[in-house]
Image (cartoon, rainbow, N blue to C red):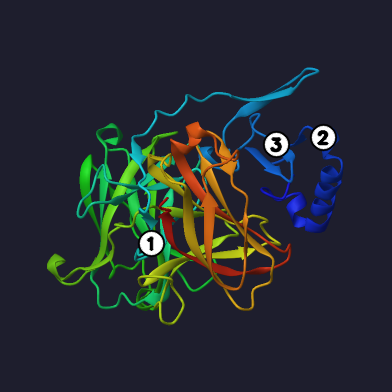
């Protein structure tokens, strides 16, 4: 498996890179490199070498659909003039095209001024920002689930520092359920305990069609006083007795309430521009707060942190599924500010990936210590015109020394002006 994805040769980076150098040395004789083992599809070109991973013949998939997690096979047609490679999807209908949002040059695409960083525990659970159903404000968090792929769909965040809930009476969140899921779902809150993998789960609440205000009593026996006084995070977990149930629900207006609902303190409103996730459980993601003067953020008061450990995962990714397809046809480039700590092991490279049905990676940019203005030109062979006009998912990817670990910070993601 090439170094851009997977966990096979990636745990032996020296051997992986040696093999890649051998391919590069003989690239005039190598049309493509095919690999398996990883349960997904992936394509990437490096130094003129085309790498394909094809592992979607029927076993459990390792990634969501947008990351190559779909059943497929690859056909290779060889002629004296050319090599033709086609990916044939199996057992799935093509998704209905989403609405298209035309991105304007100079537009701010993400500031990461959210309150918390929310993630899904399993790759089959999709998180995205939505304006289709909102309880308050303009946006909410949509969670797509499929109990046939994951028995415990959940969305979670960490509280750093821990949150003192001693003065609150209840936790409340508004949940929207479409009519097609009537009387089929429950949702419950869970708070981490002091021991590793320990969780304190509240009794689940039945959900009805439309908007539900789900309240969790913090004084119940389910939550020890020590965990209540220093909550390290929270999960909202869906449950059902319907086999193979799939669909989507929406979360909005997460708050802690005092003696009366009017005394509520909003913990999350999901008014951020996009819902971001870190691909693979070994990759950490969180929000950092600070000031421009202190140099901890580039603008505003918050940014996003990507934690990496190349010995465990070769290409950490921060990705977002777009609520509407992005048309970037009028945008010459996208930019992001990236902060590399002074003690970080170099070299580090930040890449960008645009996805429609396939992933299209741009050439990665070398980072220096301190703040970097990373510019990704959108004109070029790496990004087909059809994809540029209808992007469904975006990624920021990091590569670097095989045994290095640390964090970088991203801020101010924008569409460049001409």
Query: Residue drawn at (32%, 38%), measured in percent from left and top?
Result: 184
Query: Is residue 147 in view from this perspective?
Result: no
Residue 220: name its quadrant: bottom left
Task: State which tag comes first along the sequence, 3 or 2.
Answer: 2
Question: What residue is pinned by disc 3?
Answer: 52
Near-viewer residue (59 or 215): 59
Spot occupied by residue 153 in the image (x, y as percentages of width and height)? 44, 47
Question: What residue is pinned by disc 1?
Answer: 111
Question: What residue is pinned by disc 2?
Answer: 30
Horizontal placement of 232 versus 7: left or right? left
Spot occupied by residue 161 in the image (x, y as percentages of width and height)? 42, 77
Label 1 to label 3: alpha-carbon separation:
34 Å
Query: Residue drawn at (35%, 59%), measured in percent from left and top?
Result: 189
Q: Assess disc 1: are there few (<14), some (14-19) or many (≥20) residues with their C-alpha within 10 Å of its C-alpha.
A: many
Q: In which quadrant is the N terminus drawn?
A: top right
Label 2 to label 1: alpha-carbon separation:
43 Å
Task: State which tag comes first along the sequence, 1 or 3.
Answer: 3
């Amino acid at each position: 498996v090439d170094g851009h994805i997977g966990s096979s040769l990636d745990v032996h980076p020296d051997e992986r890179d040696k093999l890649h150098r051998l391919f590069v040395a003989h690239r005039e004789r190598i049309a493509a490199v095919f690999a398996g083992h990883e349960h997904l599809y992936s394509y990437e070109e490096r130094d003129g070498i085309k790498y394909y991973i094809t592992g979607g013949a029927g076993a459990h998939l390792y990634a969501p659909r947008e990351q190559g997690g779909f059943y497929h096979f690859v056909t290779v047609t060889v002629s004296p003039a050319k090599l033709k490679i086609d990916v044939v999807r199996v057992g799935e209908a093509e998704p209905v095209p989403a609405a298209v949002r035309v991105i304007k040059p100079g537009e701010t695409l993400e500031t990461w001024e959210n309150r918390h960083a929310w993630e899904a525990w399993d790759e089959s659970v999709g998180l995205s920002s939505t304006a289709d159903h909102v309880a308050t404000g303009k946006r909410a968090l949509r969670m797509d689930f499929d109990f046939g792929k994951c028995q415990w769909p959940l969305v979670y965040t960490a509280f750093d520092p821990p949150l003192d809930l001693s003065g609150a009476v209840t936790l409340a969140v508004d949940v929207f359920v479409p009519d097609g899921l009537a009387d089929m779902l429950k949702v419950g809150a869970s708070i981490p305990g002091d021991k590793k993998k320990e969780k304190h789960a509240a009794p689940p609440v039945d959900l009805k069609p439309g908007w539900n205000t789900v309240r969790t009593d913090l004084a119940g026996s389910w939550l020890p006083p020590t965990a209540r006084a220093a909550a390290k995070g929270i999960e909202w977990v869906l449950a059902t007795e319907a086999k193979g149930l799939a669909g989507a629900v929406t979360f909005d207006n997460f708050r802690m309430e005092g003696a009366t609902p009017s005394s509520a303190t909003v913990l999350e409103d999901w008014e951020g521009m996009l819902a971001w996730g870190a691909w693979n459980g070994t990759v950490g993601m969180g929000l950092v707060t600070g000031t421009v003067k202190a140099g901890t953020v580039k603008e505003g008061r918050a940014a996003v942190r990507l934690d990496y450990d190349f010995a465990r995962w070769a290409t950490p990714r921060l990705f977002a599924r777009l609520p509407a397809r992005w048309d970037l046809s009028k945008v010459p480039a996208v930019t992001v500010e990236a902060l590399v700590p002074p003690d970080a092991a170099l070299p580090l490279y930040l890449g960008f990936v645009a996805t429609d049905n396939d992933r299209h990676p741009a050439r990665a940019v070398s980072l220096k210590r301190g703040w970097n203005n990373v510019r990704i030109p959108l004109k070029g062979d790496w990004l087909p015109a059809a994809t540029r006009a209808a992007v469904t998912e975006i990624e920021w990817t990091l590569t670097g020394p095989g045994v290095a670990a640390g964090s970088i910070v991203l801020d101010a993601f924008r569409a460049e002006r001409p």
